[in-house]
Amino acid sequence: MKRIYLDYNASTPMDPKVIKEIASGMTVMGNPSSIHEEGRQARFLIEKAREKVAQLLGVKSKEIIFTSGGSESDSLALMGVVYGNKKKKNHIVLSAIEHHAVLETASYLEKNGCKISFVPCSKQGIVDVEKLASYLTDQTILVSIQSANNETGVCQPIEEIANLCKQKEIFFHSDIVQSIGKVPIDIKGLSLASLSAHKFYGPKGVGILFIKEGVPFERLIYGGNQEKGKRGGTENLLGIIGLAKALEISLLEMEEQKERQFRLIERLWESLADLPGIERVGDPNRRVPNTLLVLFSGLSGHDLLIGLDLAGIAASSGSACMSGSSQPSHVLMAMGYGSSQAISSVRFSIGKFTTEEEITEAAQRIREVVLSQQKALS
């Protein structure tokens, strides 16, 4: 039985061109901080990648900081700004549907003197911007709202929020991990942005934190003076090389893939829509093109995932970072769903290597698993 991978939001396979690019750097042995020729060669490749990333994103190369991934970038963004601000403002505004990397960092900061406000969202998963504006005070140092939700795929009005924060002279961070390479996004209006390479066909263990020039920032990882003094530690040369190539390819292919993946995900939904008790979650007209989150009333999302896995389908119930948790999705709870509904969710996310034949076959297998589990409970 051929397996079908429908969990691209958790991680994507590496593009063969990215693997080739990484291989080209595997013989570079020098430490990028060393002054000898071998070290300079490694440094050259890192700075070349930084320049490429900056050009692709339309920002300055000195605003690009390489990290270990999205979670680190999120943590650095919140903690770096809070500890780096000289005015000692201590209020942060988040949405209730942020990634756990943001929520857990905020929880830590709250225990250490920060005040956290959570902006509600609609049943469609869209943040209430008017409510957000009402939460802002003269003590607000940072707003953090993700560009697209990792579970629902719903996109937020990032440009509108960025303009609001600019007017109020408040720093604005956005986790753009799930939107980069899927939909157009302009990060120049943001103060900080988080990216992760393995979400756009690059290697795992490497990411980016964009820090706009002039944003106060206190480093959290001490040691060497790497990454413009903002993150100590020897750089992940091969990861950085792969990240830059993956970003280049993803942005180049984005428009073509956006249309293709939207069509495929709609086809998958149409093939499942008549199943008893099924419900599609989130605004279908305001989302990244590759994501479908559905509820199967009366069934356990966990049991469905096991059944799907045995049927050769890789799917998810939400964030892979929280896959060991038995708690209902905090995203769905924040959207107004009950706990029994929230634990019945399954997320299907496709990518550029997903074929039409796989969608047809996946729909048939999904139907068989769902109907079998519904029959067992009847």
Image (cartoon, grey):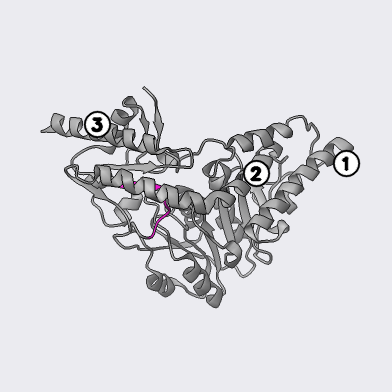
Segment tinted magenta in the rendering: 286-293
At 76% from the left and 45% from the top, the residue drawn is 224
In the image, residue 348 above or below residue 2: below
Closest to the observer: 351 or 337? 351
Residue type pointed to by label 2: Lys
* Residue found at x 41% / y 74%: 134
Q: Position of residue 298 (x, y in %)?
A: 18, 41
> For this view, does 58 lie left or right of residue 228?
left
Q: Mark 2 near mark 1, Cβ–Cβ under 8 Å?
A: no
Compute the Cα span from label 2 to label 1: 26 Å
Residue ID for mark 2: 245
Residue type, label 3 = Val
In this figure, which residue is indicated by the disc labeled 1? 35
Q: Quadrant of residue 211?
A: bottom right
Q: Earlier in the sequence, mark 2 or mark 1?
A: 1
Residue 204: name its quadrant.
top right
Quadrant showing the N terminus? top left
Q: Is residue 272 above or below residue 219?
A: above
**Mark toward the start of the polypeptide (3 vs 1):** 1
- Residue 48: x and y in percent read 75, 48
Residue 291 magenta-highlighted: yes
Q: Position of residue 268 (x, y in %)?
A: 32, 43
Q: Which of pointers 3 and 1 indicates the residue nearer the eye? A: 3
Outermost residue, left side: 378
Please give the label number shown on residue 369. 3
